[in-house]
Amino acid sequence: MKFETWLFLGGVGFFAPVAIVYSILTDWQEPVGAAALFLTAGLALLIGGYLYQTSRRIDKRPEDNPNARIEDGDSELGFFSPWSWWPIILAGSAAIMFLGLAVAYWIMAIGAFIGIVAIVGWVYEYSRGDHAH
């Protein structure tokens, strides 16, 4: 977690000075942008601090060891359906729902219906047919 910790703590070192420079350049007259940048720096500090505390409590991961081999990080990550079409249908339904936000709410309802069908199909994909458990 060493890289992730320094990535987020480096974000604090970037966003805080940018917020100060932004505030000075706008003569402190535009508070929304400055507040957003300061809050982004604070959020990066929270996440970086959490990752730092967590990295002190757990053992080093293979990603943190420069002498680690590829086999050291090889573990079971989960089961993924290699030939499933349901994620594509679910992504299409999300696109239709976002289109509904921009165009008309009734299109969003159609996307939600397709999304519910896609989620049910994806969950029960291995409960019937040739791949039933």
Image: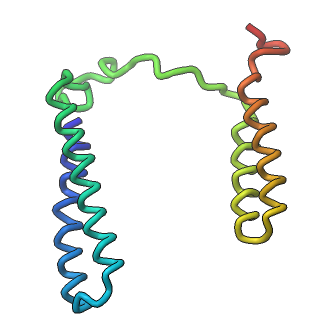
Please give the name of the residue rendered at 79% of the width and 64% of the height, measured from the top-left corner. Answer: 105
Residue 1 locus on image (x, y percent): 23, 35
* Quarter holding residue 50: top left
Q: Is residue 133 left or right of residue 71?
A: right
Q: Is residue 47 left or right of residue 77?
A: left
Does residue 50 sit above or below 121 in this rendering? below
Camera-side residue of 91 and 81: 91
Does residue 57 sit above or below 107 in this rendering? above
Please give the name of the residue rendered at 52% of the width and 21% of the height, measured from the top-left corner. Answer: 78
Please give the name of the residue rendered at 81% of the width and 45% of the height, measured from the top-left corner. Answer: 114
Residue 48 locus on image (x, y percent): 22, 46
Does residue 99 sit above or below 55 in this rendering? below
Residue 122 locus on image (x, y percent): 73, 29
Q: How many numbered badges does the structure rendering display?
A: 0
Camera-side residue of 106 and 72: 106
Q: Residue furthest top?
A: 133
